[in-house]
Amino acid sequence: MQTKPFRVLGVQQIAIGGPDKGRLSKLWVELFGLEKTGDFKSEKENVDEDILRIGKGSHAVEIDIMQPLDPEKSPKVHIPPLNHIGLWVDDIEKAVSWLEQQGVRFAPGGIRVGAAGHKVAFMHPKGNEQFPLSGEGVLIELVQAPADVIRDLG
């Protein structure tokens, strides 16, 4: 097998679409506290997008929240929204507790050890009557960051 001429170094961007980016903004900006750094609209690409940032310097990741300008036209930036993303958190117990108090629904199973050995909890992709806030169609995994990630990214 030939040596790969590049390396994957981390997450640069995650794009999440929905029929109403206002609901996405409630989650990503208001509840998670991400910074909006710009916006982008394109008739050709049928998109109205807010550009957000999480992290600092070279460790920063761009999160684009998008809605279609016309839901009947293509491309349909909201279908599919996204399957799953993982986010480092510095204190998973406090994060889950606070988010639940804000009305965020979590998937069954609570906080548990995930496949990589870190504590994880999954935000449900759909809200319900008791917990109306959710990942807005996206399954979001909160992951307890190890000390070195907290040191480097915190």
Image (cartoon, rainbow, N blue to C red):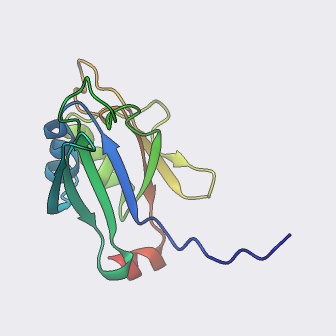
In-front residue for pair 97/3: 3
Task: For the N terminus, give its image quadrant.
Answer: bottom right
Residue 132 versus residue 72: which sits nearer the camera? 72
From the viewer's perspective, is 99 left or right of 148? left
Q: Is residue 105 left or right of residue 84?
A: left
Q: Say which residue appears at 15% left-offset and 62% top-offset.
A: 38
Can you tell which quarter of the image residue 4 is in? bottom right
Determine the residue positioned at 32% across, 76% down: 154
Whether residue 132 is situated above or below residue 32 in the rendered picture: above
In this view, 84 is above or below 51: above
Toward the front, the furthest residue is 44
Give the image location of residue 117, x and y in percent: 61, 58
Looking at the image, the residue that sits furthest to the right is 1
Q: Going by the picture, which residue comes out furthest to the top?
A: 129
Residue 126 versus residue 43: which sits nearer the camera? 43
Give coordinates of residue 7: x percent, y percent: 61, 75
Q: Tell me where residue 91 appears, x and y as whole percent.
A: 35, 61
Q: Quadrant of residue 68?
A: top left
Say above or below: 69 vs 120.
above
Q: Residue at x 44, y 45 (%)?
A: 121
